[in-house]
Amino acid sequence: MKRPFSAAQAAGKILSVGDLTAHIKGLLEHDEGLAGVWVQGEVSNLVKAASGHVYFTLKDEQAVIKAALWAGVRRQVKTELKNGDSVAVCGSISVYAPRGEYQIIVSDLRPAGIGALYEAFEKLKQKLAAEGLFDPARKLPLPFLPKGIGIVTSPKGAVVQDIFRVVRRRFPNMPLYLVPAKVQGEGSVAEVVAGIQVLDQDPRVDVIIVARGGGSLEDLWTFNEEAVCRAIAAAVKPVVSAVGHETDTTIADFVADRRAATPSQAGELVVPVKDDLVRRIQDRRARLTRAMETALTLCRQRLRKAEACRFLQKPALLIAERRLKVANLARDVEQLAGRRFEARRHAFQVLAARLTSLNPRALLRRGFIMATDEAGAVVSSVGRLRPGQALQLSFVDGRAAARIEEPIEPIEPLEPVVSDPTDASQEDPS
C-alpha cells in the first residue's frame, strides 16, 4: 500500500487515480476517529456470497454507505440479516480502490428495529394477502400464442432491449406495444398504473409485461405501492411482473399472474419459439397427409371390390338370394316349432295317462272289476265239483285262482275204546 503524501509533496505534481485513491484510503484508514465507529441505518441490497461474506448497503434519509461483513465475523453474529432491517454496526472505514468506493468493514452488528420501508412493505403485503389478491385461484393463465404483447417500462436502459431481443429471437414477427413510463421517483406510480390500464383496454394486446431493472428497496418501491398492485390485480388480461433481478421481490410479484426472475425471462414466458411451432405444424401436416393417403387407398380398394361384386352389378340377385334364405329360415323355424309342439303334446299325453291311472275312482273301479271276475271264477269252479273233489284256491300276483283236485278216499272212523267198569284188573285210583 502506498503511503499518504503531504500537501507540499502534492503541489505542482499530477497525480494518478491510483495515487489519489491510495492517499484517500490512507487518510480514512489511519484516522483514529473513524476506528471502531458505530453507524446505524437500514439494510438494503443485501448479497450473500458463496464464500460466506455478506455485502450490503447501510442507508438513512440523507445518505448511503457500503458495508462488508466477512465470513469469520458473520459466524459470530447471531442476527440473520435481511433487507429492511434496521441495524447498528461497528467497524472501520476502508476504501475499495478498484471502484473508488469507501465502505465500512463490519466487526460487530446489532439489530436496531425494522426499517420504515420494510415495515410498510410487510403491512401492505399482509393487507393484500388478506383480501385474496395473492390467491393462485384468481390468477389468469398466459395465452399460448398471443396476438400482441404490451410492455410497461422505461424506454431507456437495457430492460426494454432485453425483452425486445428475446421476443424477436423466439418469434420475429410478434407485435410489441410499448407504453413508456417512469419506473422510479416522483410520478412513477401514476404512469405505471396508466400504462397498465391503457394496454388492458387495447384489443391488439393479449398479455402485459410490467418490467424494471434491479435496484435497492427504495429504487423498486414504485412496485410496492398499493395503486400499482391494485391496477395489476384489476387487469382483465394476464400480467407478468419482471421487476428487478432474481433475488429482488416486490408486492407486484405476488399480485401478478406470473412472476419472471428477469425481464429476459418474461420474454420467454409470454411467447413460444416460432420455429418449434412451424416444425410441429409441418410434422402434423405430414402425418395428416399420410393418414389421408392411407384412407384414400382403402377407399379405392373398397370401390374396386364393390365394382367387382355381382350383387351390386345385379341387385335382383341379392334380393332373390336373401328371399330364398328367408324362406329356408322360415321353413326351418316351422319344422322346429312342429317338432317341439309334438314332443310337448306327447309328454302331455303321457302325463295325462299317468294322472288318469292314479285317479282313486279308476283304481276302485278296476279293483271292483277284478274282484268280480275272481269271484265268478271261484263260483264257476265250485259248480264243476263232483262228489269227493276238492277246490284249491291260490293267489298269484294279487289275483285269486281255483283248481279242482282229484277225489280223496274217505277215511273210516275208528271205534272208540270203552273200558269195562267190572274189570277187576283195574285198580281203584283212589
Image: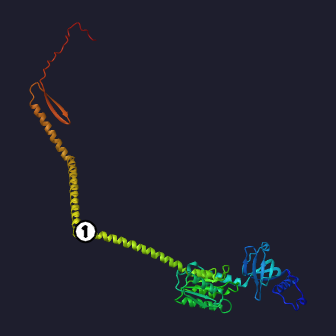
- The answer to whether one can see residue 199 in this image is yes
Q: Which residue is mark 1?
A: 311
Nearest to the observer: residue 206 or residue 23: 23
- Crowding at dot 1, Cα within 10 Å, few <14 / some 14-19 / many 20+, comes out as some
Name the colour scheme.
rainbow
Q: Position of residue 214 (x, y in %)?
A: 68, 83
* Residue 367 figure quarter: top left
Q: Residue at x 12, y 36 (%)?
A: 376
Q: Quick one: quadrant of the C terminus?
A: top left
Q: In the rendered picture of this protein, how many numbered marks are placed on residues? A: 1
Q: Say which element carries label 1.
A: helix
Instruction: Left or right? Give the position of 318 relative to 279.
Output: left
Nearest to the observer: residue 217 or residue 25: 25
Instruction: Left or right? Give the position of 320 relative to 71.
Output: left
Figure check: 189 above or below 334: below
Q: Position of residue 61 (x, y in %)?
A: 75, 88
Q: Quick one: quadrant of the N terminus?
A: bottom right
Q: Residue furthest right?
A: 8
Q: Residue furthest top?
A: 424
Q: Residue at x 16, y 39 (%)?
A: 371
Q: Residue at x 13, y 22 (%)?
A: 408
Instruction: Left or right? Give the position of 126 relative to 175.
Output: right
- The answer to whether one can see residue 132 in this image is no
Q: Amino acid at mark 1?
A: Phe
Nearest to the observer: residue 242 or residue 281: 281
* Residue 245 figure quarter: bottom right
Q: Position of residue 222 (x, y in %)?
A: 66, 87
